[in-house]
Image (spheres, grey):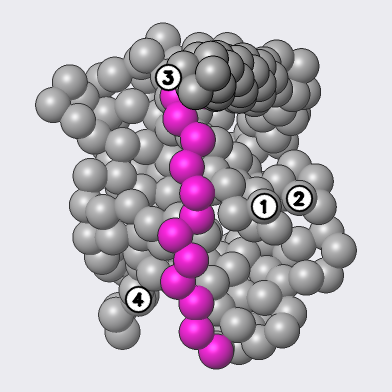
Amino acid sequence: MRQFKLIQFTFMAYLMLLVWSCGSSNEETSLDATITGEESLEEKQLLENGFQQLTEWTAHWKRQVPGFDLHDFKLSRVDSIETIERPEENFITKGNAFFAYLKDQPDGKGTVDIYSYKITFPEEGKPYFNPDSEVTYFRSDGMRERLLFIGPSGAFEDAIWLNSEALLVVGHFESDAGVSPKAWIIYPESQLIHQYESNLTTDDYRREGFLTKRFSVEKQSDGV
């Protein structure tokens, strides 16, 4: 009798383990389908719409690298935002070189700056480039949050809100193979970053060319 109960218990435990494994597998499959299915198609459309609005950036890349194609960008990875924040109000006010390029969140929840961490202006006015770059979110609650950071191998060049939830940031990254354009779609509320990469690599891209042109003395004097 004891042997029968032991066999019965073993069988039930095995059955429960099998059911749990199937449920877990189905859940993982469903998650993968969400990432690679209709949602990614919708995001791809958002990405293309964003590229169409960043005309200065796309034109710059096409002039520098004739093989540049916006349709080459593919989703390469999804990361979580490493939350780093501190109390600080937005110090970029009218008259500041970066003021015209602030990106206000559509619902008024804050303002994004992608330049002040990278660029400083000595007295003569010519921009000086620091090694690192940061996408900074000055939230309306008085907190400063780092949404994205990149070291000396790359830089953020332009940005635009795609809607109230998604921020598109574009730039470049240098590897052993050369310089490549990159795009990041950042979701501040859900704390996710979707990184898009292009297969294009080049040795001819002047890494600080876009930022130098945007923040040249001549352009500032024109009021642009």
The tag earlier along the polypeptide, 4 or 2, is 4
Q: Amino acid at mark 1?
A: Ser
Question: Dot 1, crowdedness within 10 Å: few (<14), some or many (≥20)?
Answer: few
The residue tagged 4 is: 121
Looking at the image, is 6 positioned above or below residue 117?
above
SS assignment for the magenta stretch, majority: strand
Contact? badges 3 and 4 (CB < 8 Å): no
Q: Secondary structure at mark 1?
A: loop
Q: Residue 85 location in percent, x, y?
A: 50, 77
Q: Residue furthest right?
A: 107
Which quadrant is the N terminus positioned in?
Answer: top right
Q: Residue 80 location in percent, x, y?
A: 50, 49
Tell me which segment is drawn in magenta.
74-87
The tag earlier along the polypeptide, 3 or 4, is 4
**Residue at 83% of width from left, 70% of height from top?**
108
Q: Secondary structure at mark 2?
A: loop
Q: Amino acid at mark 3?
A: Ser
Residue 55 occupies which quadrant of the picture? top right
Give the label on residue 190, or none. Answer: 1
Distance of mark 4 from mark 1, alpha carbons? 35 Å
